[in-house]
Amino acid sequence: MKPRITVITLGVDDLEASLRFYRDGLGFATDGMVGQEFEFGAVVFVQLQPGLRLALWPRKSIAHDTGQPLGSRSATELTLGHNVGSKAEVDAVMVQARMAGAAITKPAHDTFWGGYSGYFQDPDGHLWEVVWNPQWTDLD
């Protein structure tokens, strides 16, 4: 299997609130909600970088589609890393996230490995790490 991940889907409880957070608060480009004409079909797609999309899909719809029971949320199942080019960019994104309504779970700080990062949670508790890694110089 070649690693060809093209969509990362986040289960959400309130699709409209998640759309507002990501589109209006964080400024992510999206065409908004699609698939509303289908039961369990409403979803939001966000183009991240070429070949990669973020999908926001109600947790109930994921449970229905996969045949799995709807379970409780856990913030420690997964983190999303948003890598930026400087410490100042980490600080700026953390402010933007807070202004959008994110909960700051760990303020930006120098890391033990020489980087700089902070964590926030979106309205559904998904953890985002905003991070500057001085070893990664290929970020645009």
Image (cartoon, rainbow, N blue to C red):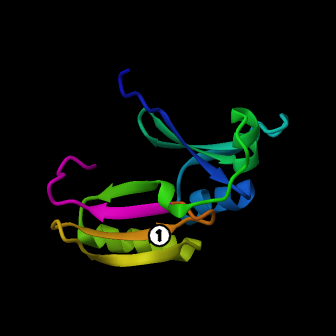
Q: How many marks?
A: 1
Q: Is residue 136 magenta?
A: yes
Quadrant into which the N terminus falls: top left
Q: Position of residue 18 (x, y in %)?
A: 65, 58
Measuring 41% from the left and 69% from the top, which residue is drawn there? 119
x and y, in percent, of residue 20 in the image: 66, 61
Residue type beneath disc 1 = Phe
Front in this rendered view, residue 120 or 68:
68
Q: Nearer the viewer, residue 122 or 137?
A: 122
Q: Residues within 10 Å of mark 1 (few under 14, many from 20)?
A: many
Residue 62 is situated, as x and y percent measured from the top left of the image, at 69, 41
As helix, strand or loop, the secondary structure at mark 1 comes to strand
Tell me: residue 37, above or below residue 112: above
**x 37%, y 72%: residue:** 92
Query: Residue at position x 31%, y 69% from top?
Result: 117
Query: Which residue shows up at 24% across the image and 65% down it?
Result: 86
Circle 1 is placed at which residue position? 120
Question: Is 8 positioned to the left or the right of 123 in the image?
Answer: left
**Which range is magenta?**
127-140
Residue 41 vertical position relative to residue 3 in the rendered view, above or below: below
State which quadrant residue 113 falls in. bottom left
Q: Is residue 33 left or right of residue 74?
A: right
User: Where does residue 3 sit, x and y in percent of width and height?
Assistant: 37, 28
Residue furthest out toward the top: 1
Query: Is 98 on the left or on the right of 114, as rendered?
Result: right
Q: Is residue 51 magenta?
A: no
Is residue 76 rendered to the left or right of residue 136? right
